[in-house]
Image (cartoon, helix red, strand yellow):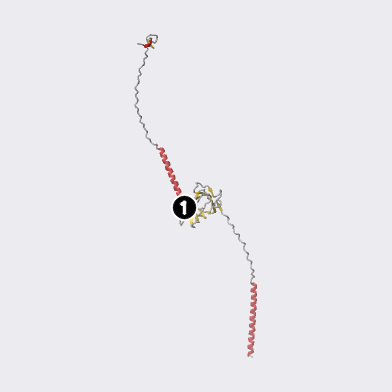
Amino acid sequence: MKNKRILTVIGICTLGAALTFGGCGKEKEKASEALHQAEPTVTETATPTPAPTATPTPVPLKTLGTKAEGAYEVQIKNATTRPISGVAIKSSGEADFTTQLLGEGDNFAVDEERILYYLPAAAATPTPAEAAGDEKLLTAAYDIRITFGDDGSTVTLHSFPFGDIAKGDLLAADGVGYLNYESVNTKSVIDTKAAELAIVAQQVADAQAAAEAAAAAAAAAEQAYEEPVYEEPYYEEPSYEEPVYEEPSYEEPSYDDNSGSGEAVGGGDGCLDGGLVW
């Protein structure tokens, strides 16, 4: 009897546990279904392919001078902070800048880069730049005159280093124009400001010496004109010539002898042409 009761209790507990776990399982299934229904549906969006970017075509640089076979070619940047209205060139043997590289009305703007072309004359023989170590030498072949558009003032690049420069900056300061560039020959950076200052200083000294010499010559000429030169008078002593005495010559009168005629002239009156005859 006692055993039946125990079995009955165990059966009741087992049934209760089964009912409990069975209800929990259904609740979990319901919760899982609700969770799946609440999750948003993710739709994949196609990523647009970017359109190819066009590569900009580089604008060709303007020129100074005319491109020609055999011409020097140098890329120059106007780093002077001033617009340039004139670029002229001459050889060392010429007196004036007759060759213009910048067209009339053209303007070489600030920070603009251009290609400088120059074809030397057939007879010209430019000397290429040579540099060794820290020694910076300029060629003695061509000078370039720069005219500024803001006030018309000019600077000169003396002995432009054609043959040793491919690209460089054009600058101006302290009354001179100069270049900063990398030497083709030595690959070192060269700045010509010191050389340009030395050239200008020598030109000023030469001009001052010439002016002083001209002033001294003018003063000497003026002094010579104002002070008369005294010349001692020349006295010529008269020469005395003793007179030549000429002794007078005496001519004895001649007498005509008419005694042989036997008769006196004048009718025999004893007179001869108004004279007495003895």
Horizontal placement of 231 versus 87: left or right?
Answer: left
In the depicted view, which residue is nearer to us: 1 or 250? Answer: 250
Instruction: Name the image quarter holding residue 20.
Output: bottom right
List the residue tagged with mark 1: 195
Q: Position of residue 158 (x, y in %)?
A: 49, 50
In the depicted view, which residue is nearer to us: 183 or 228? Answer: 183
In the depicted view, which residue is nearer to us: 265 or 8? Answer: 265
Horizontal placement of 166 versus 275: left or right?
Answer: right
- Residue under the image location 46 percent in, 52 percent down: 195
Q: Position of residue 215 (x, y in %)?
A: 43, 43
Amino acid bearing label 1: Ala
Q: Quadrant of the C terminus?
A: top left
Q: Can residue 158 be seen from the camera position used here?
A: no
**Counting other residues with Cα less than 10 Å from the Cα at mark 1, is it few (<14), some (14-19), or many (20 or more)?**
some
Q: How many marks?
A: 1
- What kind of element bears circle 1? helix
Q: Quadrant of the N terminus?
A: bottom right
Q: Can residue 195 be seen from the camera position used here?
A: yes
Q: Position of residue 63 (x, y in %)?
A: 55, 52
